[in-house]
Image (cartoon, coloured by chain):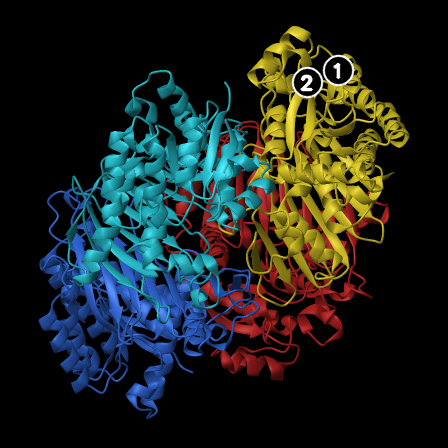
Chain colours: A red, B yellow, C cyan, D blue
């Protein structure tokens, strides 16, 4: 199959996530990066593009110009990756969706609830695919866990314990010129959620993806420990799910010693599952009354849903980039499928999209609203 | 020093905790078990006592008889261990405290708030010591952690994450004739708290002991997953401490795969600490911006507060019984000290006593009250 | 059952192992320490005995005097624990065995091959029991592993990988006045083996105990890294067992970071087992082609041989002292059994005794001999 | 920088390692796969090439034809990856080296000692680079460990403990039609070493790479547990290094539960290092007398040599493919450097090449020779 012609919005400077998207798109050789609005000016964009081997003529100063120009080319981009700060997600996505160009967008969906609603409409009005890179859902063992729960291997789910501690904002780096810290602690660029938006949404999304549950309501206690910080850098959240399961979610950017400690534990009437993002090739399965079993990627007990998104034999660890690549590769399959006439929803499969994006925004909104009401329950 | 003459109330049948107390009292050879009201009748008590090598004449049918008889003997018990179900704690303790006999009592303090208040008065009216076996505070690495925090090694505490998952009530064993399950799920014998009383109090006590913080208020979502179960078998709790620290506490008896998964993580402005009860000889210390360090019992980095309650060199694991024995041995020291004229408070040192018992009851009460108000904040 | 009257030879000063034996003897309340030749003079012995609450009249200046005196008493010791440096094991044991007093002796059996042979004869000539405290065989999960292998759960054993790294002799502490380092690096007191005698024997004994195999021959490369050190502080050993299994054994006292890193891995045609002494409540079972299973002490999958030597429920860790206590408790059972007429061999059960002691001496001798021949194979 | 035009020899069928090389070459976007002799016939090669998007005209039936044709093209391959069974390595490499085309070759170097010698000459006679994919040297934490040892952080090295257990040949898969098992157990295609050639060479190479030591001699006990298997499936090896360090190496393909359990522990006079391939983002550093420290990829304590070969922040695990990609990316740098006039040795940096290949062959030869002499010492 020919490679998909890909453009990128943002990701031109030292931004961590732009490079991640590019590697993820290359791992399975399904994309070719051909254009970009990588930075805020055409000049900077060309400089960034040159380093990536892009044709200078296809390095644009802004996404609107790019969308128009690329849509007009016979060899224009088929899809774009949007890897900007959150407040740019919506306008950029809309520009391409309106031209029928598929969008792969970083999370959270948008910075504001208004934008989220608008995004939902933009997606609804377009024939193009909208994929949200909730990349942790791409880890093979998360596919394994989801399939096991769906198959009833732990019985009806009772408890969902999710956490995502980090430590990088323990000190107020936003006052020390660290760009990542600046925009992620700035409500204008990040939205109303700090840690809940940046990492809480990941944990919540993964919890729902794996458990198969939908959140019903939550009670949240958000706090900013960093002096002068507006957005939350720590959140304690109690969760109630449709159907009666309960849970907790803790996300933090001020927990020293934790890098990206995303961890998910789900317990049902018959057993439990436990997984940590930092050691992603291992899934603990604890059938009640039996010895805990360690299911390893491509090892005994791992089944099709996990094996299908694995590349190499067990014992040779795959990591974050491979999990991210799974989203890209499935997106490529989906793009080719809709190009061949498959219905958009059918093409999406388990890929996270607008629905998950809206759910994530609802999570952020509910967290902030609950916290403002001293942790009262707020519907999701 | 001569051994302390010890009596035991409860612990006569197959009760897990009676045997634990007896072993704990023997490990450092500071006690001699000489009398008991081990069971609910004199006959059963004598049978249980015979197995322990007790003089039949000192095997009593009830604690009141025993208190009177032993107080009258020149060689009567100096102290008693109370290892009954919770609702017996108060009357039994009072019987001995009133005779000036020292009491070592299992937790939680009592089954009801009324009893707790009465217990507080009974202790205040007596010259005898009252020690509550919050045994996890006896683990060397918990002493280490407490000392490190007190010394400022992690800076001002921001976050306290405590959890204590178990799985033994995943099924409704109380309907299958399992005695432990029967009384622990029975409000009449356990009190208003299920998991919050049985294990939540342990987690809360340990969190306060190590962090040096006092709880200010909490919001709790208690639930019974077991069909027909009255008391909570799972609790999600959000915590706020005096001084601004926040935390979460999760305790559960329905989380398959977890045996006694008590875990404590505390984060401050400068670093963090992490500890798991099931691997108690290890303490993670994560100074912010430095590689995590593993402090091992009696190993490099372990200091006096831990080493003083260790018996054997590093790499030879001590366990639950040794931690429990530390409480007993310090109690023996305290008893001998008050017998020599030391003031009761001075003698107690870091031993948990009535204050911690009352705090634990307040925790249970607040959890239940909060949950009844749909997780509203309730003062501690 | 009444407690066994116990004496102790050695263990009077700050010696680590004397205290361990005393605690181990107390945990299950089967012994009463009543006499001792705790130190090298009567005066020191009385001082040590006073601290332990012994009758001064039964604190002896040497083991010969003690053996004679205690044998003459109607309430004399029924058994003695020998916890001296290795070169005293034989004469002390013989003194008591000759009086029909049971002996519980620390390992290795003796300092020299001559003494070992003499010990074998002394045991053969006596009716008393001789128990060698290869205490690691007392860990519940080692009993579990042994039973699983005996039951064929991993199929015929192919590989036995044993190791026991420590780091305490990384520096030459024997030149800095550290008593433990002095005698353990002194051939006159320790015998011909350094690390192979002190810890290699433990690893070898455990490997044989669990696998059920007998060593056939070995090739060993012993080395002293500590400057001026005579005895080996590191040993690399290749093993061949009767029946065709092979293995490796590494023991070291100069491997920084390792405390008592005894680890055993055994692989058969159908599966494997893995265990580490520092985390003794866990046993990995890896049936070939299935997910690894974690068997926990008193947890699912743990069976009678392990549960019978466990005291408390799963998730509350037992440790080194409890494993050691299992040897003492089984020794008490064995002593009472022979006193009741049971044949000595029948009473021993799985307790390590003279046979294991002789095998350990053969291991040391073969290691030293092989190393002197540049790691040629030497029969065991 | 423009991408390097790459060809591939082998890797056309379901071979695990061909796909790995292709992904590794893509991750950092430094190569473009343009030609191949992917299978043993032109037809199969074209089929495989089609799946990879190769021009059918550049899909060759054998490497000789390909070398001639590509060398003649102005846009011919600049480098080739050789991912065939071992016995093809030499003739294929020679064909390209003779045309000045750079070679990236899978390990071990060759199947026979004769071929190894010939390969050495072919490399010496060529101006092209020869890179051997000892990919484990590409893991960031292995770079970290090497740099720390070179900087003296653990003092002079005393001990090197290496192991690489697998379990995939526990059963005799070679009799059940498993292709990987067939050629890897066939001396004609694999050479004289079974497990020692396939995985022992990896462990030995890594041990030398990290420690900075050269092997002096070894004593090896090789064995085939699989019925009817000619080549070793398990090897126990004792090592002596130049300068006096000693070590052990165990590799096995019959150790159930182990996938790719490559593990390296190195101990010096001042500290130790420990690393496991299956959890590659962690490096334990154990300075003697201090608490063990966990150095994490891109985390505190990780330095330039590791960070320079890392792509993403700490806590987002990199894995096997990224480590492999580091070899490819450094090879790309080296190729561009020699094309710009840098001397070949200077361009190689720490990349494994012919020297390491020859050392690996010496290791295999010595293992086999030693084992044939009943584990006598054989010089390396």
B362 to the left or right of C81: right
D130 to the left or right of C33: left
Q: Return the residue nearer the eye: B378 or A129.
A: B378
Please report, as a chain letter, where disc 2 is located: B
Q: Is C187 located above or below residue A286 in the figure?
A: below
Query: Which image quadrant is residue C103 in?
Result: top left
Measured from the top left, where is residue B156 in percent x and y? 77, 59
User: Within 10 Å of the Cα at label 2, are there few (<14), some (14-19), or many (20+) other Cα atoms?
Assistant: many
* Whole-number angstrom distance, CA of label 1 to CA of label 2: 7 Å
Check residue B36 in the rendering and tell me which mark sits there, or answer none: 2
- Asked if labels 2 and 1 touch by Cβ distance under 8 angstroms, the answer is yes
Q: Earlier in the sequence, mark 1 or mark 2?
A: 2
Query: Which image quadrant is residue A160 in?
Result: top right
Furthest residue toward bottom: D341
Measured from the top left, where is residue D227 in percent x and y? 13, 42
| Residue A128 appears anywhere in the view | no
Measured from the top left, where is residue A119 in percent x and y? 68, 55
Q: Name the residue under label 1.
A: B66
Q: Is B11 located above or below residue C154 in the figure?
A: above
Q: Return the residue nearer the eye: A242 or A88.
A: A242
| Callouts 1 and 2 on one subunit | yes
For image coordinates 82% across by 37% down, the residue present is B359
Q: What element carries label 2?
A: strand
User: Within 10 Å of the Cα at label 1, are there few (<14), some (14-19), or many (20+) other Cα atoms?
Assistant: many
Please report, as a chain letter, where disc 1 is located: B
| Residue B113 appears anywhere in the view | yes
C31 to the left or right of A63: left
Check residue C110 in the rendering and tell me which mark sits there, or answer none: none
């Amino acid at each position: 199959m020919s490679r998909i012609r890909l453009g990128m919005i943002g990701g031109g400077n030292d931004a961590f996530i732009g490079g991640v998207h590019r590697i993820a798109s290359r791992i399975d050789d399904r994309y070719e990066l051909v254009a970009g609005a990588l930075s805020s000016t055409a000049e900077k964009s060309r400089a960034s593009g040159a380093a990536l081997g892009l044709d200078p003529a296809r390095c644009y100063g802004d996404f609107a110009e790019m969308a128009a120009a690329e849509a007009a080319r016979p060899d224009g981009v088929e899809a774009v990756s949007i890897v900007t700060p959150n407040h740019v997600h919506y306008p950029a996505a809309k520009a391409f969706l309106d031209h029928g160009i598929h969008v792969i967008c970083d999370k959270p969906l948008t910075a504001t609830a208004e934008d989220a609603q608008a995004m939902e409409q933009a997606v609804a009005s377009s024939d193009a695919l909208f994929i949200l890179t909730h990349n942790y859902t791409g880890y093979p063992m998360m596919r394994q866990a989801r399939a096991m729960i769906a198959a009833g291997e732990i019985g009806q789910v009772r408890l969902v314990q999710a956490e995502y501690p980090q430590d990088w904002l323990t000190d107020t780096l936003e006052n020390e010129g660290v760009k990542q810290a600046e925009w992620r602690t700035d409500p204008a660029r990040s939205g109303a959620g700090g840690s809940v938006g940046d990492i809480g949404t990941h944990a919540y999304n993964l919890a729902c993806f794996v458990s198969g549950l939908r959140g019903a309501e939550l009670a949240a206690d958000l706090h900013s420990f960093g002096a002068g910080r507006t957005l939350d850098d720590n959140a304690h959240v109690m969760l109630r799910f449709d159907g009666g399961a309960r849970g907790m979610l803790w996300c933090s950017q001020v927990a020293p010693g934790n890098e990206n400690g995303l961890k998910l534990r789900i317990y049902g009437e018959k057993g439990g599952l436990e997984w940590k993002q930092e050691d992603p090739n291992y899934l603990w399965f604890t059938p009640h009354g039996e010895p805990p079993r360690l299911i390893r990627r491509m090892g005994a007990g791992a089944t099709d849903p996990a094996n299908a998104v694995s590349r190499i034999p067990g014992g040779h660890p795959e990591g974050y980039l491979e999990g991210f690549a799974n989203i890209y590769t499935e997106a490529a399959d989906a793009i080719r499928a809709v190009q061949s006439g498959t219905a958009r929803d059918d093409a999406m499969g388990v890929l996270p999209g607008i629905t998950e994006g809206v759910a994530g925004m609802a999570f952020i909104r509910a967290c902030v609203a609950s916290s403002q009401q001293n942790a009262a329950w707020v519907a999701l």
